[in-house]
Image (tube, rainbow, N blue to C red):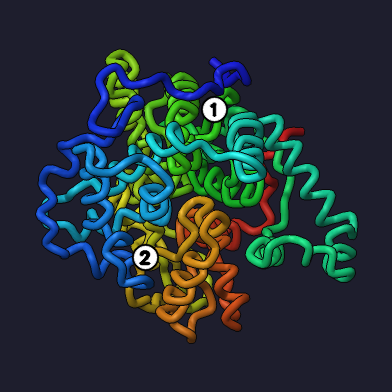
């Protein structure tokens, strides 16, 4: 199964409407029924912290979503603003004494909004180009990566910056361009054998953004897995996880991508993910198929296979490196890893198992950094305010900040630059791989084809 241009139509209308929700997948009453508006969520919400406005709090958004279902409000721009200003960080659900699924309600409400109030003009064209025309198509992503690599290596990037042509872009895009990671080309086999005895075969989600901007992290992930007795398969028919689409309200496209990934990884025993947002999305695929029983069942089976790389290593056992990496490091909890998947201590345990690593506690480590998918592009002012608050909690006397999500890595790198810091941004699994490499010496790279 592959995603075709002809598949990219809007959702079909809901057969039974719920108040003023007229389209498929309306917010579910069971998700807001237990909310008693106690306010326990308020202190956990980054947007409420910045605005102090009830409509930008979790309980305020739940109230608005419920009001539309009761026919008291319309699905319009006034409703869209507080719903799309949410970072969907899930911290409110962690804080909630009855686990109200605010994130699920937000995503369902966004799906209704984008049916009733679709994006138009330049914003709509850009949205369609990237979310429909690029991310679902591996070959187009590789081509985009090639163009970016040419831009960086040909000297064009230096010219654009020196001549100030870059300033023609909005300021927040100029800032993001300034910390754009080096795009590297990585050609991999579809099956990389374990180093030594094979204990298990696992499949790896290489992702879209991850494989363009952070292919070295995918390489580190494969190195660590094979070092610990895993054969690693990379299905060629896998695609984007669909998180960006669902966050943007495009649930229909999210379903198409979910179906393609379920089929691609159907034979795998475990699906390893090194991007928190992707893992969280894939663990929630069944939510997209509430009215498709066959696909819902397949999605529920698939969800049980998906596991973050740090949790997989922690649960199955891994060889503790002998070589030391002497560094002072702090750890940032990616929202969709800590709040979305409940993975907190596993990455920290891995870091502490590396000789020479000194861990420094970060206050409010599970507070959102403001990345939230492409939130730092669509809501730059709020994202910057959230980032400023985050950077105030980063200890100054550390050399590295570790985390497990590419969006966070880009946003935190921006924070380091913007607020005069010097810390290196690393993925947790990179540090473990570096320790292994230091221990092994200059060993031939088994990832590359002959």
Q: Quadrant of residue 126?
A: top right
* 445 left or right, relative to 38: right
Q: Which residue is mark 2?
A: 47
Residue 439 place in picture, x, y as percent: 56, 61
Viewer-proximal residue, 158 or 311? 158
| The C terminus sits in image quarter | top right
What separation in Å lies between label 1 and label 2 (alpha carbons)? 35 Å
Q: How far from the left and from the top, in percent, is residue 90?
A: 31, 54
- Mark 1 residue element: loop
Of residue 41 and residue 204, the one placed in the foreground of this image is: 41
Return the mark for residue 238: 1
Residue at the location (59% across, 57% down)? 437
Q: Residue at x 78, y 62 (%)?
A: 168
On the image, the x and y values in percent for residue 14 come to: 32, 21
Residue 213 pos. (x, y %): 65, 50
Q: Secondary structure at mark 2?
A: helix
- Which of 52/87 is in front? 52
């Amino acid at each position: 199964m592959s995603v075709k241009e002809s598949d990219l139509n809007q959702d079909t209308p809901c057969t039974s409407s719920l108040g003023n929700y007229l389209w498929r997948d309306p917010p579910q009453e069971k998700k807001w029924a237990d909310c008693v508006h106690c306010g326990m969520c308020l202190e956990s919400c980054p947007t409420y912290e910045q605005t102090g406005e009830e409509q930008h709090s979790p309980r305020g958004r739940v109230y608005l979503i419920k009001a539309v279902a009761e026919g008291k409000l319309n699905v319009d721009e006034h409703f869209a603003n507080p719903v799309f200003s949410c970072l969907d960080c899930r911290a409110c659900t962690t804080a909630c004494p009855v686990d109200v699924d605010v994130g699920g309600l937000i995503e369902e409400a966004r799906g209704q909004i984008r049916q009733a109030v679709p994006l138009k003009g330049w914003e709509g064209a850009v949205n369609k180009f990237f979310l429909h025309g690029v991310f679902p198509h591996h070959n187009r992503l590789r081509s985009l990566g090639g163009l970016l690599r040419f831009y960086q290596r040909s000297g064009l990037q230096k010219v654009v910056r020196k001549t100030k042509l870059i300033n023609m872009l909005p300021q927040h895009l100029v800032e993001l361009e300034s910390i754009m990671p080096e795009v590297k080309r990585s050609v991999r086999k579809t099956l990389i054998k374990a180093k030594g005895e094979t204990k298990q075969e696992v499949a790896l989600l290489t992702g879209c953004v991850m494989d363009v901007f952070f292919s070295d992290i995918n390489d580190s992930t494969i190195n660590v897995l094979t070092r610990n007795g895993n054969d690693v398969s990379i299905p060629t028919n896998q695609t984007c996880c669909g998180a960006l689409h669902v966050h943007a309200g495009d649930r229909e496209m999210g379903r198409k991508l979910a179906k393609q990934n379920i089929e691609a990884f159907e034979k795998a025993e475990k699906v390893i993910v090194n991007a928190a947002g992707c893992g969280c999305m894939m663990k929630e695929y069944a939510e997209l198929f509430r009215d498709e029983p066959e696909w819902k069942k397949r999605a529920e089976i698939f969800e049980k296979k998906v596991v973050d790389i740090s949790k997989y290593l922690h649960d199955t056992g891994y060889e503790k490196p002998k070589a030391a990496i002497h560094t002072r490091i702090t750890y940032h909890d990616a929202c969709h890893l800590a709040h979305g998947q409940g993975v907190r201590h596993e990455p920290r345990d891995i870091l502490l198992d590396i000789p020479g690593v000194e861990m420094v506690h970060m206050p409010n480590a599970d507070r959102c950094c403001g990345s939230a998918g492409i939130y730092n592009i669509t809501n730059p002012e709020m994202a910057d305010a959230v980032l400023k608050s985050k950077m105030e909690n980063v200890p100054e006397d550390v050399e590295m900040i570790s985390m497990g999500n590419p969006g966070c890595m880009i946003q935190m790198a921006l924070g380091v630059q913007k607020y005069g810091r010097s810390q290196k941004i690393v993925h947790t699994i990179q540090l473990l791989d570096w320790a292994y490499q230091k221990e092994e010496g200059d060993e031939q790279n088994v990832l590359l084809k002959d």
